[in-house]
Every structure is written in C-alpha cells, then in structure tokens.
Image (cartoon, rainbow, N blue to C red):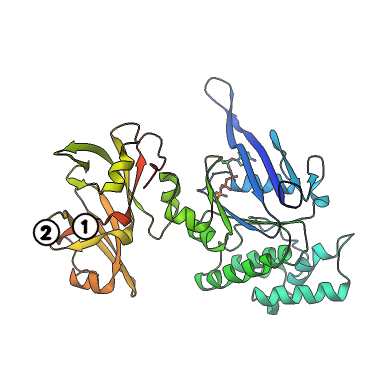
Amino acid sequence: MNAETGTGLVARGITKSFAKGKSSAKGKNEIITALRDLDINIAPGELLAITGPSGAGKSTFCRILAGLERPDAGNVTLAGRDLAGIPPQQRRVALMFESYALYPHLSVRGNALSPLQAPGGRLDPAAAAKRVDEVLELLEIRHLGERLPGALSGGQKQRVALARALVQIPDLFILDEPISHLDAKLRHKLRGEIRRRLSAQSAPSLWATPDGMEALSVGDRVVVMDQGRVEQVGTPEEIWLRPASARVARLLGDPPMNLIEGDLVHEGGALFFTRRALRLALPAALARAAEQASSASVILGVRPDGIAFAPNGATGAAEAEIYSNEPFGKHAIVTLDLGALLAKAKTSMANAAALGADAGGGIGRRVGLLFPSEGLALFDGTTGRALPGT
Ligand SMILES: Nc1ncnc2c1ncn2[C@@H]1O[C@H](COP(=O)(O)OP(=O)(O)OP(=O)(O)O)[C@@H](O)[C@H]1O
C-alpha cells in the first residue's frame, strides 16, 4: 500500500485563513491566508522536511495535522482514516510543539513518560521506562531526569519536549523546529540521531524548520513553502541543484545563492546579463534558457562557491572591490562590491590569502571575478521561477 491508498499521510487542498484581529481603516476585519490549497503526501516511514521563511505556514500545517486547528477547506487522511472530526488525543500523532508545552509539575522523566501512560498506551510500564531512558540518554538529558521544567535552560526544555515526542509509537510524528534552540554541536549530532530513529519506524514523519540547510540534511524529501504555498517539493539533491524559484534559492546555502536582478541585452550575436557596472556574457545553456524569460528583466543566481578570482583587469573578468571578509579557517567568505551591489563568494583560505583577504585584510582591494557556468542559474524577473534548462 502506498500513501495514496491509505497507510501514509495524505493532505489535499488544505486552506486556512485567520482574522487578523484588528479592523482595517475601512472597518473590515483583515484576513491572513496562512495556507493556500496545500497538497502534501508523506509515505509510511518517510521523513518529510518542510521549510520556509517565518510566516510561511509551517506551524499552521503542523497544527492542522495534529487537530489543533481546523482547515477552512481540504482534508487529511492518516493510515487510511479521514482525520476530520477525530479529536487530537485520538489521532495517534506525536507532536512536538514549537512552544514545548511541558507539564510544569512533572519532572523531566515524568514529562517524557506522560504520553506512554495515557489510556490505550502500547507499552507495559517496564518497557515504557526503558524507552524513556534510551531517549533521554540519546538527547543527553538523562542526568536531569528528576528536575522540574522550571529549573531547565531553553535548550534543555526543548530536548524534553523532543523526548516526549520520540518515546511514542504513533501513526505520525510532527516535530516543529525540534532542534532550533540547541548549540551547534548538539544540533549537528541530533540531526543524524533523530533522523535514524524516525527512519526505523513505520510512521510517516514531518520535520518543520525555517533552516533550509537543516531541511536538506534531514529530509528524505523536502517541501519548500512560502506565503502559504508550496514552492517546490523534491529530494534534497533536486532542490539543492535546481531550486525552482528565486524564493527557494534564497533559503538554501551558507551563504545562500547571490540573486542579482538585471537585464538581458543582445549585442554582437551574444547575450549579456547587465546590472550597473556588471556585464556578463551568458554561457550557451543560460542563453538558451533566457529565451524562455517573459521579459528582458531576469534574476541571475550566482553560487558563492561558483565565483572564481582573477587578477584585476583580466580578460572577461568582472571588476569588484573587496568589501569585507570572514576567514573561517577551512574557507573564507569574501563580500564583494560590484558597484552598489554586494555579492558573497566562498573560497579556499589559500585563494583568500592570495587576495590578501585571509585575516581581515584586503578590504578595498580591486579584484577580477569570473563566473563559471556551473555556478550560475537564471530566474524569470517577473515570476521568480527558474528558467528551464538552467
Ligand atoms: N492564531 C492565529 N491568528 C492569526 N494569525 C495567525 C495565527 N496563527 C498563524 N497566523 C498567521 O499565519 C501565518 C503563518 O503562520 P505560521 O506560524 O504557520 O508560520 P511558520 O511558517 O510556522 O512561521 P515560524 O517559522 O515563524 O514559526 C503568519 O502570517 C501568522 O501570522
């Protein structure tokens, strides 16, 4: 059986609006549409990561699946059951709240154990206690077992909320920003550990995060949302290599792709991208893609690690000035001023050193830039969609 026929999660046409509360000047209640006609499937055992900027609608979608909000339109089935009319506690959904929602009077262990003690629990007390110990150990909070939530740091509370979700054997896991308040080292470790644990279960899982790179690192598939709509669904590789729109590209990468608005100009049989002083002959694949643009205005995507340095004045090189630099040890991020336009390049420390930009130096120095075609993408200036073939 696949998700369509019953065992996974199938959400169809989910739409949800909220009244903003305050009336507008015209006396009408303003409406915010949080979700617009969303279609999302998660297969059994699949981990779907959902990402998008703040306000994209991720938490609203999670809350609808958990039964804490009712959609205005659309329906959700889980393991073949239509969830409409099923109250949250009967949905068999393990939800980790973004706000944690811990029981203040229960210890860390008591909070983690609480979902396993609910009527109809699937484990006997000894098995439940063992499971809780395992998860507390995994999340590095077992030593805090007897503490009350009031005596925990923000990151520790987040891990208790995560433990309370992970101990369950539900029909669906929903983790809303599960590791956002942890330090980088723990985040890194737990991404892999949680992924491994969820993948070993047959329930579908949803992991919501505003961090696009986190979504790519944990998801079997990734949904990118913006303003309540799905911008792109695909494997991490598809989304990374071929972002469907400038809105998707803006969310991915560290630093993300440079997005430069400019114009297409035909000259002497070649096609150029121009923006102020920047004038770039488009490689053949991009020039072909540019024919699909709805107007001469386009957005050029330049991957930070796709920028190569050349001596100032070298043939075919664009001119720029080093604006700032951040040496990270294994690589450097050099911000370049291309004439009232800043772009970031990610380069090796050796390259940065050659530019004199390896230790906070080099600022104001003029350099040449080359843009190899594999580091470029082209988006329609009106719709923001990727032009086919880039
Ligand atoms: N109860 C509510 N009342 C009014 N507006 C709401 C309510 N809940 C959400 N919204 C609005 O719906 C939109 C989507 O919000 P949502 O919390 O789902 O976004 P999000 O992608 O989870 O953002 P974040 O990453 O900041 O948590 C936002 O514009 C938000 O202000």
Nearer-N-terminus badge (1/2): 2
Residue drawn at point x = 76 percent, y = 72 percent: 109
Q: Nearer the viewer, residue 379 or 140?
A: 379
In the depicted structure, whether residue 69 falls above or below residue 351: above
Q: Is residue 311 left or right of residue 386?
A: left
* Element on which disc 1 rests: strand
Callouts 1 and 2 close, C-beta under 8 Å: yes
Residue 240 is at least partly visible in this image:
yes
Q: Position of residue 387 (x, y in %)?
A: 38, 41
Residue 71 % position (x, y) = 70, 37
Residue 304 % position (x, y):
32, 59
Q: Name the element at disc 2.
A: loop
The residue furthest left is 313
Residue 315, image quadrant: bottom left
Q: CA distance from mark 1 to mark 2?
A: 9 Å
Task: Please indicate, yes or no, whether residue 358 appears anywhere in the rendered image.
Answer: no
Nearer to me, 167 or 14: 14
Q: Mark 1 belongs to which amino acid?
A: Leu
Q: Hey, what amino acid is under mark 2?
A: Ala
Ligand 1 occupies quarter: top right
Determine which of the numbered discs, if any, sits on residue 370 in the image.
Answer: 1
Q: Say above or below: 263 vs 324.
A: above
Which of 67/267 is in front? 267
Q: Is residue 314 above or below residue 145?
A: above
Disc marking residue 42: none
Q: Residue at x 66, y 65 (%)?
A: 199
Mark 2 sits on what residue? Answer: 314
Rendered image quadrant of residue 247: top left
